[in-house]
Image (spheres, rainbow, N blue to C red):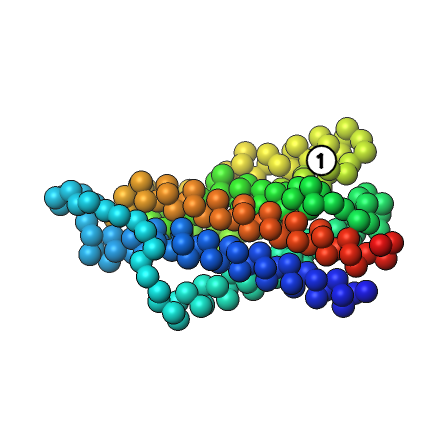
């Protein structure tokens, strides 16, 4: 059973990573490449004549695209393992049905997106190259603490049976943002804010789609391989 669930988690993660990677190549990478042109000075934001800019897929860089897809698949395989493990824990404790439906899988996926993408981006938005940023170690610590606190909070919201536990979930959800993410000392950078905003929104959009695919696929496979099926 363990090996079947492990294999299923890898399959669900690979599918979600493939979908997310393809969407990233079509929607995120063109914005990233445009930001790199500003970072290297090939395009200038201030002090130059206005230019007509078109952000679209720039063509195939086979090596870069394959590495991007491979990285996306590896990341979501890891997410798939975590998600199936949490589903297994919830099922063993009779918190969820051993045969969750598609709707429940989508809800699991959205919860994962909120914990690992949306909540951290509230303090640390996805950054384009050349943008101002705080100390890397401080950002990593805050990101990890935020994802952990948000994950526990969402678990409590879904499964807690007492008001005290729900109140604890609210505290955990808010605490990282009350403390605040590491801040930059000054705002700077050659990349236009419009490109930075578009990059952040597309990263979050692609993340949401990939997590919904992951949750739905993992839930379907978990239902098929659960002992009570």
* Circle 1 crowding by C-alpha within 10 Å: few under 14, some 14–19, many from 20: some
Name which quarter of the figure residue 63 lies in: bottom left
Residue 126's x, y, as percent?
Answer: 43, 47
Nearer the observer, 222 or 182:
222
The number of numbered discs placed on residues in the rendered structure image is: 1
Who's the residue at 69% across and 41% down the image? Answer: 103
Can the viewer see residue 174 in this picture?
A: yes
Which element is circle 1 on? helix
Nearer the observer, 52 or 194:
52
Seen in the image, is 18 located left or right of residue 63? right
Residue labelled with disc 1: 157
| Picture quarter with the C terminus | bottom right
Residue 124's x, y, as percent?
Answer: 46, 44
Residue 214's x, y, as percent?
Answer: 62, 53
- Residue extending farthest to the top is 163
Seen in the image, is 47 located left or right of residue 184? left
Seen in the image, is 152 located left or right of residue 174? right
Who's the residue at 48% across and 40% down the image? Answer: 123
Can the viewer see residue 149 in this picture?
A: no
Seen in the image, is 192 located left or right of residue 122? left
Judge whether 154 appears above or below 99 on screen: above
């Amino acid at each position: 059973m363990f090996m079947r669930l492990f294999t299923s988690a890898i399959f669900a993660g690979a599918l979600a990573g493939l979908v997310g990677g393809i969407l990233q190549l079509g929607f995120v990478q063109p914005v990233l490449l445009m930001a790199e042109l500003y970072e290297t000075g090939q395009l200038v934001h201030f002090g130059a004549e206005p230019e007509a800019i078109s952000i679209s897929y720039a063509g195939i860089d086979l090596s870069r695209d394959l590495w991007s897809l491979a990285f996306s698949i590896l990341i979501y395989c890891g997410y798939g393992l975590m998600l199936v493990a949490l589903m297994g824990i919830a099922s063993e404790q009779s918190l969820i049905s051993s045969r969750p439906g598609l709707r429940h899988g989508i809800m699991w996926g959205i919860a994962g997106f909120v914990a690992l993408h949306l909540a951290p981006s509230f303090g640390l938005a996805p950054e384009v190259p050349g943008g101002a940023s705080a100390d890397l170690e401080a950002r990593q610590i805050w990101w990890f603490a935020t994802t952990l606190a948000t994950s526990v909070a969402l678990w409590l919201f879904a499964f807690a049976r007492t008001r005290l536990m729900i109140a604890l979930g609210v505290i955990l959800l808010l605490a990282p943002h009350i403390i605040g993410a590491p801040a930059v000392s000054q705002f700077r950078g050659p990349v236009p804010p419009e490109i930075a905003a578009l990059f952040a929104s597309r990263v979050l959009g692609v993340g949401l789609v990939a997590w919904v695919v992951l949750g739905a696929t993992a839930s379907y496979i978990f239902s098929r391989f659960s002992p009570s099926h």
